[in-house]
Every structure is written in structure tokens, then in C-alpha cells.
Image (spheres, grey):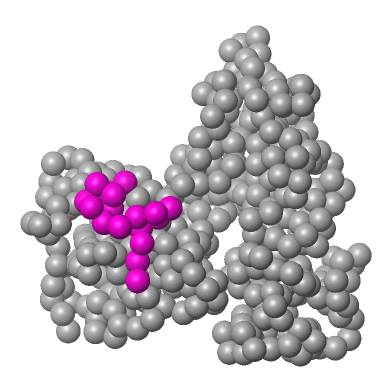
Amino acid sequence: MSTERVVVVGGGQAGLQAAASLRERGFGGPLTLLAGEGQLPYQRPPLSKGYLAGQDQDGDLLLRPASFFTTHGIELVCGDPAARIGRRAREVELCSGRRIGYQRAVLATGARPRALPVPGAGLAGVFTLRSLDDAGRLRSELRPGRRLVVIGGGMIGFELAATAAGRGLAVTVVEALPQAMARVASGELAGYLTGEQRRHGVTVLLGRTVSALLPGPQGRVGSVTLTTGEQLAADLAVVAIGVRPDDRLAREAGLATGDGVLVDEQLRSSDPAIYAIGDCARYPSAQGGGQVRLESVQNAADHGRHVAAGVCGAPGRYARVPWFWSDQHGRKVQIAGLTDGYDRTAVAGSPAEGRFSVLCFRGGRLLGVESVNRPADHIRARRLIAEAGPGLAPEDAAAAVAGPAGKKSA
């Protein structure tokens, strides 16, 4: 088994999984994990849900206890992020000036929130939600009766809105597009979840954009101005308009990038000694039919496992079916596959009863399945897309996912 040194840059789900999987596969070489945030690696999905709701505490989010790294011989470096990669010398230089040599490096640098380019975006009381520190600051502000404006109606924006409404805040979501969650959801699913938000008291404004955030009497944000001229009173605001891949290290090292670090089917960058995984990586997708960059725990963890296998002598093409999940107002949403560009849907189950699946097709090919409170459909869909999705007729796909009863075409 290889004894070369591996340095993993990034202590999120992808980086942690890569390091853990290397040891699980018997990798015996020196192994360093750089967790730049200064904390033990932790889960991010609960930040917009259980943690923000006050149900989870910091310790509940840890992916591994501190003892794991000692036991498995993983050097964990917290609070000293990577500053640059020297490809010729094969070393990673940290902000402290320390240099760590490598034979293989894994970039798992994640993504950063997109900034809102309008006046007032830097006011006190305006938040983004990406890190545990972000969530801790925001959680302390979520008090019943306060007015929250969520700017962005994507997955995180809707999860955050649901959590805040559950804590007794008056919540308004402002989405620039005519459909919420347009990047990840079909019209059927988006319409259903928008209806659920409104049914639980959340105001959802579609097709609106923010032009400014204005201060209140104490200098904190006091209102949000829309391009329509509408003024929304606000005690706090959260910017949730998506993220950008954190590919700075790769770009400055001269690696090929383009909305993320460009990698091949084995997740290797343009320098074969350097891999990129998780939210920062753009890879060739067997399901998507081109280069994709995904932001999900499943993608991050599976990338980490795949790279570990490659380093340990079992390289191969990455071809896992993507899947995603969300919790909103007690509704469990699970998505298998990638549904961009669908031209036909079939619905199984009952949206009125809050238990249904939407199957999305393009040109007769099954792209993905969106399930609400139907976990069995989700499991079958993942298997179906992996094994037979490309050549399966819509009627056969619907029957295979949910059975012939209750399906209808749209």
C-alpha cells in the first residue's frame, strides 16, 4: 500500500470523507487534513434546520470526535488555512508560513456565499449562512415577533424561512425568478413547496429583486427596497442567493478552472497529482451529460470515497447518481438525479395529501425523481436511474418508481 504523503485541503464533508476513506482502505502514508475554519469538521445541512431551530448544539454537528484523528493517524490542522499551492515543489503553504510537502493533494475547498451587490448589504443585521459561526450569530437573532426578509428562494432560503417561521418570526422570501427553487426543482415541486410556505404564514414574493437595504434607527437594517418600489420592514435579513466555488487556490496554482476546478472522470485536476472534490469541483457527469458542479452532502462524501479508492490503487470513472434532500415544514423532500431541461413530467401519489413523486423526463429519458414524504419512491428512483434510466419509457419509469396506481402525466 502506498506510503506517499497526501494533503487534503478543506475540512468539510468532502475533505473529511477523503481522509477517513483513505485510512479505511489501508492507506499508510502521512496524511494531513487542513480544516481552515479552526473547528473540528462538522455537518452543514443542520445549520439551516435543526441547529438554527435550537434543536442541535455545536457538539451534535461533529462529523468525527477529536479522538478519531489521533487514533487514525490523521494530522488535523485547524485555524491555519492553505494560502497557496506550489506545484513545482509539491507543497502547500499555510497562512502561518508553514509548508507541507505532498505527493498527492486533494482540494476540498467548498464554496462561498454570493454577495448581494446592492447598497446596504453590509449593514448590521444582514447575514449569510454558510458556516457554523454564521449560524450561531443568526440563531441568536431569531426571536419571536421579529421581521425577517430572506433574499433568495432556493433550497437554503426556503429551509431557513421554514425554520424561522417555526420560531415565531414574520418571514418574507424575495425571489428574483418567477419560480422558487428554479435551479433544483420542477414546477410541480416548486409550486407545492411555495404553497406550503404560504400556508405556514411565510410571504413569498416571486419575480422581485432587491435594489437596496436601508438602515433603521439604530443603524441596523430596517427595511428592504425592491425594484418595484415596495418597501419591506425588516429587523434582520439573510442573503441566500447561491454560492460560488472556492477555487482561488487552484486558479493561482495554474490549474484549469471554470465555475469550479475542472476535473476528469477520476476527479483529477489538470495536474494529475491534485484532485478536486465536493462543491468546488466541476466534473463530467454520467447523468447530466456534461460537466456539472453539485452542492450536496452525497456528492461531497461520494467524491471523497472515490478519490481515496484512486489513491489506493483502484481508480475508476465516477458515476454515482446525485441525490439531494430537504426538510421544510415537516415535509421530507428527496431528489434523485438531475432534472435540468426536463420537457415532461409524471406525478405519482397525491400532492393534496402531501405524499407524491414527480418524475422528470427529457426526450423520453428519465432525468430525475422528486419525492415528498415518499422515501420508498426515492430509493427505487436512485436505483432505476443508475441501472435503466436512460432507455426507460416514461410509463415504465413511473410504474417502476411508484407502481401503476395513482400516476398521471403532465
Find the residue positioned furthest to the top: 217
* The stretch drawn in magenta includes residue 365: no
Relative to 40, 6 lies left or right: left
Left-right relation of 103 to 220? left
State the residue at coordinates (14%, 63%): 102
What quarter of the picture does the N terminus occupy? Answer: bottom left
The outermost residue toward the front is 363
Residue at x 44%, y 71% (from the top left corner)? 284
Q: Nearer the viewer, residue 273 or 262?
A: 262
Q: Residue at x 70, y 64 (%)?
A: 333
What residue is shown at x 70% (from left), y 68% (from top)? 342
Is 53 on the left-hand or right-hand side of 90? right
Residue 171 at least partly seen: no
Q: Is residue 255 above or below residue 29?
A: above
Looking at the image, which is closer to me, 266 or 377?
Answer: 266
| Residue 65 percent across, percent down from the top left | 37, 60
Against 180, residue 400 (above or below) is below
Magenta segment: 248-264
Asked whether, in this view, residue 346 is left or right of residue 98, the answer is right
Quarter residue 149 falls in: top right
**Residue sitting farthest toward the left:** 89
Name the quadrant of the C terminus: bottom right
